[in-house]
Amino acid sequence: MSGWWRRRAAERAAQADGTGGGPAPSGPSGEGPDEVPLAAEGLREPRWQPPGATITVTEVTEGRPEQEIVRVRVEPEEAAAWRANAAIERLGADHPETLTVLREYARVLAHTPAGTDRAVELYEYVAGTQRAVLGARHEETLRTRAELAGLFHHLGRVQQAESLWQANFRARAETLGRDHPDTLHSADGLAAALESLRRSAEAEPLLRDTLDRRSRLLGPDHPEVLSATNRHAAALINCGRHREAERSLRSLVPTLEQRYGRDHERTVAARGNLAAVLVRLDRHAEAEPQLRAVAASWEALTGPNGENTLSARNNLAAVLHGMERYQEAVPLLRDILARRTALHGDGHPITVSSRENLANVLIDAGLLAEAAGLLTRCAADYSRIHGPGHPRVQVVREQLDWLREHLP
């Protein structure tokens, strides 16, 4: 629990035994800034790149070989639009093959910064038309709805994503069977949405089940099983089952290092989750060097704005917070918040969580007025994202009540 909460508990105890209501000295923060550990390869096709096209102009002269004059690269969005228009002209807008091409166009738009709104509209059109033409439980309809659910999650529309994944998971389980790869993929997507909604107690048994099924079907050392083990360990951390998570990760990390090397993304993800366990167990001296190394590895792999990089740096800030090194933790969290705001927008759930993390450390650093301003925004955003009665909203409101009592 954070320092502000310890002070609040001490004040309540003091009031109860009549010794007065002055604030107790703040000790180490325990968990520090909250962060959902990010496991490797939560869903399939993590590195899909939109295909482009090339236009080649040639000269054909009688009696001579064909000669290339110029070659022009066409951007992925424009190439996908051409393919979609050609399919509509050739087959019609409602033909199953056209709908597949339109889904590919939507996927390209989803990977274009300015194209996500159009991608959602196109996905919804394709899914609705496939439902009418092919049926609600046809393989292609379910694939389109799964991609739309993933896009919703990426855009921060997590409740919509969770609803879509729930329906998609049930439909695939009933039509394809619980062990089918597509069903397991839907289970992964649903679990990720539940984690983002702070419903880890629901996500953990789902991830345990998919891990058991993959282990039985593929063997304990299969890459998908190793990734599923890491995802399940992350869920255990979020459920507070830290000793179980540590045991799992202590076994997993050496296996990954031996198979892939120390700096492979799967290995680094597991090392990061192991470091996160150490943070939660207040073993900060062990966690700090690991997290610095993990953050450096992720930055080399995905760049300074990669989500895994930011998550590792956030957990490093939690260590610094726990060691009362607030002057180091605060600028780190300011930078994370700025980057996530630029990447995802001001009201995205992960941006809001980063704002709350910064506020928690500002409280312990004595910057109460700034913390109160940040938490006021968090309370409004969490009410919008989760609903006004959500536990996350109540925690922030209790923090604000405490701050109002102690602001000068």
Image (tube, helix red, strand yellow):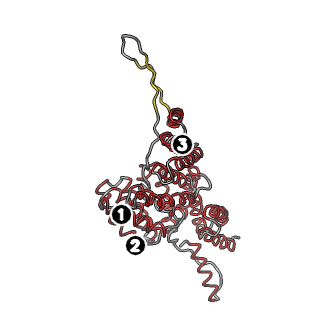
Cα gap from disc 2 to disc 1, whole angstroms: 23 Å
Whole-percent x and y of residue 52? 47, 35
Whole-percent x and y of residue 221? 30, 59
Count of all numbered marks drawn on residues in the image:
3
- Ranked by sequence position, the earlier of labels 1 and 3 is 3
- Ranked by sequence position, the earlier of labels 2 and 3 is 3
Cα gap from disc 1 to disc 3, whole angstroms: 34 Å
Q: Which residue is mark 3?
A: 109
Cα gap from disc 2 to disc 3, whole angstroms: 43 Å
Between 252 and 32, the one lying in front of the other is 252
Q: Residue at x 29, y 55 (%)?
A: 259
Q: Tell me the quarter of the picture where residue 41 sits.
A: bottom left
- Ranked by sequence position, the earlier of labels 2 and 1 is 1
Between 323 and 346, the one lying in front of the other is 346
Q: Which residue type does callout 3 highlight? A: Leu
Image depth: mark 1 or mark 3 in front: 1
